[in-house]
Image (spheres, helix red, strand yellow):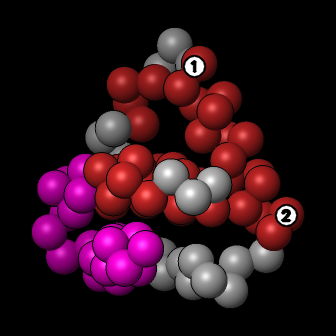
Amino acid sequence: MENVNICGADQSENEKLVNSSRQATKSPNFSNIFNDKSKLNKMAIAFYSEGKYEEAEKHYKLAISLDPNFKAAYNNLGNAQRK
C-alpha cells in the first residue's frame, strides 16, 4: 500500500513528481496512466504540491474509482479537500 504524507514530503521529491506528471501528459501512452491507481495518486500529489487542489482532488477520485479500498488516496483526498 502506498501512503504518502503530503505535508511532510521532501521538496525535491515534490519537484520530481511535478516534472514526471508534466512529462506523462506529453507521453503517447498517456491514457495508460488513467488505469493505474498509484500513478494517479502520484499525479494528484504533484498537483497538490503546486497548490492545484481541485486538480489533485480529481486525480485522487479517479484513483479511488479504480480501487475503492485505496486508503492512501482517501487520506490524501481529505487533505486536499481541507485546502
Q: Earlier in the sequence, mark 2 or mark 1?
A: 2
- The numbered dot on residue 61 is none
- The numbered dot on residue 12 is 2
Secondary structure of the magenta portion, mostly?
helix
Q: Mark 1 sits on what residue?
A: 27
Q: Residue at x 16, y 56 (%)?
A: 65
- From the top left corner, tell me how far across and down residue 54 is, in percent: 37, 53
- From the top left corner, tell me how far across and down residue 61 is, in percent: 24, 58
Q: Inspect the image, locate mark 1, and give the three-letter code of the amino acid beneath it.
A: Ser
Rendered view: 34 above or below 15: above
Q: For residue 80, what is the image quadrant?
A: bottom left
Q: For residue 35, what is the image quadrant?
A: top left
Q: Residue at x 72, y 61 (%)?
A: 14
Q: Which residue occupies the foreground of this view, 47 or 17?
A: 47
Q: Secondary structure at mark 1?
A: loop
Residue 37 visible at all: no
Q: Is residue 64 magenta?
A: yes
Q: Inspect the image, locate mark 2, and give the three-letter code of the amino acid beneath it.
A: Ser
Question: Callout 2 environment at 10 Å: few (<14), some (14 to 19), or many (20+)?
Answer: few
Name the mark nearer the viewer: 2 or 1: 2
- From the top left corner, tell me how far across and down residue 76 is, in percent: 40, 75
- From the top left corner, tell me how far across and down residue 41 is, in percent: 43, 59
Magenta residues?
Answer: 61-83
Q: Is residue 70 magenta?
A: yes
Left or right: 6, with 8 as reference point: left
